[in-house]
Amino acid sequence: PYDRFRSLAVEPRLGLGLPHWEEDPAFRLESHLVYESLPGAGLDRVLERVSALMSQGLPRSRPLWELRVLEGLQEGAAVLARLHHS
């Protein structure tokens, strides 16, 4: 039911036509789940990291989403979901 999470946004060849979705034949769930350690980080450090990540584009070579687990925080852990608006 969530095929879009396994699809690539593909630009038209030679700039003719509209972008479209194609299933990623090399899809691997592990490519979209990222674990990052921020030992002892407080809220300010976590927010700085989230801000930096949110200002980065998602790789166009794979489906446009990522779940990142920020571990080792003073308060436990956080999960950041980055999804393309399409």
Image (spheres, rainbow, N blue to C red):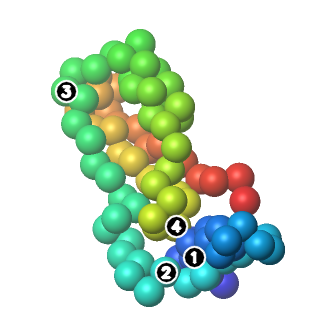
Is residue 24 positioned above or below 38 on the image? Answer: below
Crowd class of label 4 (few under 14; some 14 to 19; many from 20; radius 10 Å): many
**Do callouts 1 and 2 mark residues in contact (Cβ within 8 Å)?**
yes
- Bin the neighbour count of mark 3 within 10 Å (Cα to Cα): few under 14, some 14-19, many 20 and up: few
Which is more N-terminal, label 2 or label 1? 1
Q: Are marks 3 and 1 in contact (CB under 8 Å)?
A: no
Q: Earlier in the sequence, mark 2 or mark 4?
A: 2
Q: Is residue 66 left or right of residue 13?
A: left
Q: Does residue 72 appear anywhere in the picture?
A: yes
Query: What's the residue at 49%, 37% (across, down)?
Result: 56
Name the residue beneath numbered marker 1: 7
Secondary element at image label 1: strand
Q: Is residue 51 left or right of residue 4?
A: left
| Between 86 and 20, the one nearer to me in the picture | 20
If you read the primary sequence from the N terminus, does the residue marked by circle 3 or circle 2 appear first?
2
**Residue 19 percent location from the top left of the image:** 73, 69
Side (left or right) of 73 relative to 54: left
Q: Which residue is mark 4?
A: 63
Q: Which mark is residue 32?
A: none
Q: Amino acid at mark 3?
A: Pro
Q: Secondary structure at mark 4?
A: loop
How far is disc 3 from disc 1 in space, using C-alphas? 34 Å
Quadrant of the rendered image containing residue 20: bottom right
Mark 4 vs mark 3, foreground winner is 4
Q: Residue at x 36, y 17 (%)?
A: 45
